[in-house]
Image (cartoon, coloured by chain):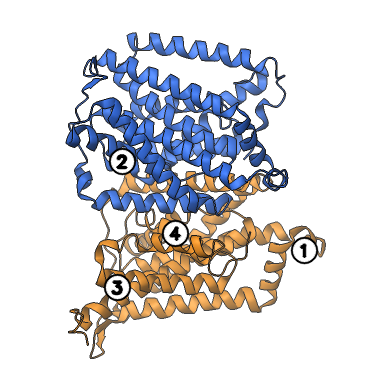
Amino acid sequence: MFELIGISPQALFGQLLLGLINGAFYALLSLGLAVIFGMLNIVNFAHGALYMMGAFCAWFLLNYAGIGYWPALILAPIVIGIFGVIIERTMLNRLANLDHLYGLLLTFGVALIVQGIFQNYFGSSGLPYAIPDLLKGGQNLGFMYLPNYRAWVIVFSLAVCLATWFLIEKTKLGAYLRAATENPTLVRAFGINVPLMITLTYGFGVALAALAGVLAAPINQVRPLMGADFIIVVFAVVVIGGMGSIMGSIVTGFTLGLIEGLTKVFYPEASNTVVFVIMAIVLLIKPAGLFGRTA
Amino acid sequence: MATAAIATVSAKDAPRHEMTAFAVMTVLLVVAPMVVYPFFLMQALCFALFACAFNLLLGYVGLLSFGHAMFLGSAGYFSAHIAKVWGWPPELAILAAALGAGVIGVVVGQLAIKRQGIYFAMITLALSQMIYFFCLQAPFTHGEDGIQAVPQGKMFGFIDLSNQMVLYFTVLVIFLAAFLLIHRIINSPFGEILKSIRENEPRAISLGYKADKYKLAAFVMSATLVGLAGAVKAIVAQNASLTDVHWSMSGEVVLMTLVGGMGTIFGPVVGAFVIIAMQNYLAQFGQWVTVIQGVIFVICVLAFRRGIVGEIAHYKRWSL
């Protein structure tokens, strides 16, 4: 069969695997964007910069404190999450009563500052980050070679996505969160500290981006602009999925990663633009997005 | 994104303030090349037109496009290619390129106006990234090299654009004409409907206006005028490159408009001159320019939302 279409199974499955990994990052990032959007009604343009900071945080921990991959997987999201909380407390909460576009402009400014500072000190070239010893090597599945680390990224990010879905859709805390999204004033009247919830939600969304950054560090090199172009694709993913549903973000993220991988095999010239083309088609057919509610 | 800075000005005074400001601006721009390097002024004028056309959409329809670089950059490629490879005279190259940007505007606008607010911003950003990748791969743009050594030629056969002063005054005339056109659009019945859509879209629809058609028309006008800026810029700089299609250029025009004052007629011009001057003077500091731009963004959003011209208009109660 593979000979018929002139593509080796190695190449096909290899690209599918790469696609799934990109899809895992799309899912983690668009999930964070959706969570933040739900509570704060802003699009976090700094998301790509925070993803990059997560990767750099892991790199700093390894090179300056000797702290390896596994602790960094916990520590980096916490550190960057606290950074996000500071941004929310000092800046974003002043914009609560203004047009939502101001939140977008502010976070875009934050992204420029963060990326500019990192570019000053690290240039544009990549820093290597080694795969942890435990996950070196790979499995030969017969039809393809599966590196352990890549399998780990897919399984772990899927688990994080599903845990987030469970937290928001099935727990009491999640119920408060969803209620505060619908009607913050009413939820406050019940004695729940909504401003604190907003702050922590932003921190959580940012932590998800940082986690994606740590996961990406050993695969993609750690670069100051690693998130800048990536986040634009994630925005397209968000438009395709619609930000109304948590599960929608996860499914859309992984699916689009796969489609992008397939495009790399069959029509590589379009692999950069396929997500944008799909976005245009979805806008024509279902403007609210595949899982979105009509605005 | 309504800025009510000019709400208190009486309708009688508004034209007088605007005419005085326009006269001052024209005199300054006529005298300027004797003091300031003309090439810098021409660059700034192109960016000023870019920002004014962008402001037509943000300030008067309330639509924040984060992808306007696609019109600036692609029109730059069009005019450079037409002037260099096809050998058309500059006036036709510029005109064709602006119309080309308008055609892209029709396609992109139809998709983008299906969503509002932040989705509109994300869709325009994503589509402009698609155009960026297209420009990176298409053979006629020459990828990373761009189109270089674009001939300036003779406009209408007798205006020699290779003379720097002649080129400057040609660019100035184009800028002033486009500026007056934008002013006319904003103050026409059509412009009033755009403003009503900005203030309350459902209400405008219930009054019988087809909001989507008006939004698309404004989007296409904005795209065409941005295309004019990009086409002239390519002739002035004699090259077209990927810088002008990149998303950071879309961010820069937002910054110019924000600094100058969105929803004001003169704001984007002031903002463009401030930002371009800053980039020139700070060029030796490398990436710190990006950091400074980010800081200005944050300060403007937190404490200075009216912008320079907006603040002046507010305190002096002028209409600018």
Give the CA separation, mark 2 to mark 3.
Answer: 35 Å
Q: Which residue is mark 3?
A: A131
- On the same chain, marks 4 and 3? The answer is yes
Give the CA separation, mark 2 to mark 4.
Answer: 24 Å
Question: The disc labelled 1 sits on which kind of residue?
Answer: Val
Give the CA separation, mark 1 to mark 3.
Answer: 45 Å
Question: The disc labelled 2 sits on which kind of residue?
Answer: Thr
Q: Position of residue B30 (x, y in %)?
A: 39, 10
Look at the numbered disc 3 and give the secondary structure of its residue: loop
Question: The disc labelled 3 sits on which kind of residue?
Answer: Ile
Does residue B8 appear to the left or right of A73 in the view shown?
right
Q: Position of residue A283 (x, y in %)?
A: 50, 60
Image height check: is A201 above or below A255?
above
**Residue B287 shows in the view:** no
Q: Position of residue A11 (x, y in %)?
A: 22, 77
Residue at image position (44%, 39%) is B223
